[in-house]
Image: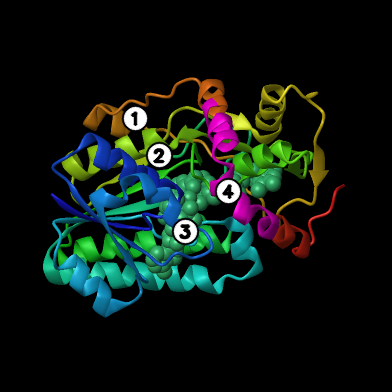
Amino acid sequence: MRLLVTGGAGFIGANFVHQSVTSRPDVHVTVLDKLTYAGNRASLDQVADRIEFVHGDIADTALVDRLVGGVDAVVHFAAESHNDNSLADPWPFVQTNIVGTYSLLQAVRRHQVRYHHISTDEVYGDLELDDPKAFDESTPYNPSSPYSASKASSDMLVRAWVRSFGVRATISNCSNNYGPRQHVEKFIPRQITNLIDGIRPRLYGTGHQVRDWIHVDDHNSAVWEILERGRIGQTYLIGADGERDNKSVVEMILEAFGRAPDDFDHVTDRPGHDLRYAIDSSLLRTELGWEPRYRDFRTGLEATIDWYRENESWWRPRKAATESAYAAAGEKVL
Ligand code: NAD
Ligand code: DAU
């Protein structure tokens, strides 16, 4: 199979490329990535001789048409992915997440190429802490931030291209990923690298918000199941029953560093901060037989901490600029 992976130099995309190259020798991967601040060529160093790398923009219709014309399937990870950035400047989110997805959809339509669209549970909005129901495939869309609204928009384009033009597409909406190669702007890597640098972890607001954590390798194994055996036009939710509140996650990271559980700062809350995400992945499990491999969050988190300790050269060049951006956005210790 010839596969085009967009956003393959980002966190989830790079781990997907590693998993694909390692476990599927019959797959030839071409990565298309713009190398924004979030993309990192070094994330693909270990597989560089097994893939083709194209530096370019998914909104470049001529380039996308040429690349899509030469593959059997597209897995579309490329996106502006960080909520805080979308609050500071929404435009790149509209351009990449909506216009970029449109460009890919037109190309897969023209060349009749199988397409898998990577999306997020954030399109469903948020849940109360005591809501007994989790998100499932029938939950109405209700996005809160410019990021989640742009992802919701892109999902809607995919649904329309399936129905109106017969595009052979599937969509997956996954919960919060953790694991190696995640940018230091994101919650878990930010706290780990802060502690390596002797800075106290930073918790937005109360820290009572809940996220449903899944290891990135489990997300990617689900994507492969859907790509190979998913029903065309179907949406699948991906989650691994990993609900934790942010404060507990910070306490667990502090414990791994041998620090006191209250050795963190509360900082300015995120405007419009979603309270809780939770995924019901029954459809994926019953229909496709998928199961997560990382069932113990603590073990996965400790392995992730080790990865950041052992790969300082990967994250160090981005750390100072990331913290300066948070300070410039007005983040203050409460
Ligand atoms: P990331 O920010 O780490 O990586 C995004 C990648 O896309 C980067 O390599 C960047 O250079 C590339 N990119 C950005 N704009 C581009 C453009 N116009 N053309 C080509 N490449 C471009 O993101 P991530 O966390 O790996 O997320 C990947 C996908 O998974 C996104 O679609 C995101 O919405 C979705 N998702 C993420 C999570 C999560 O927890 N991180 C959970 C569910 C879904
Ligand atoms: O749910 C899936 C989504 O998960 C993806 O679609 C997004 O691409 C991905 O970034 C992630 O979104 P979140 O906004 O949930 O992730 P983030 O890592 O930014 O924050 C996780 C939680 O931690 C959130 O409640 C905000 C909080 N937080 C974040 C940072 C960076 C803190 O308390 N302190 C921090 O320093």
Q: Measure the alpha-carbon separation of dots 2 and 3.
A: 30 Å
Q: Is residue 224 left or right of residue 155?
A: left
Mark 3: few/some/many CA within 10 Å (<14, 14-19, 20+)? many
Q: CA distance from mark 3 to mark 4?
A: 12 Å
Q: Mark 4 packing: few (<14 Cα in 10 Å), some, or many (20+)?
A: some
Task: Provide the secondary structure element on which disc 3 rests.
Answer: loop
Q: What is the span of residues highlighted in magenta in the rendered image? A: 303-322
| Marks 1 & 2, CB-CB < 8 Å contact | yes
Q: Which residue is mark 3?
A: 39
Q: Is mark 3 within 8 Å of ligand 1?
A: yes
Which is more foreground, mark 3 or mark 1? 3
Q: How crowded is the residue under tag 1: few (<14 C-alpha within 10 Å), some, or many (20+)?
A: some
Amino acid on which disc 3 is placed: Gly
* Residue with the mark numbered 1: 282
**Residue at image location 34% in from the left, 67% down from the top:** 101
N-terminal of the pair, mark 3 or mark 4, is 3
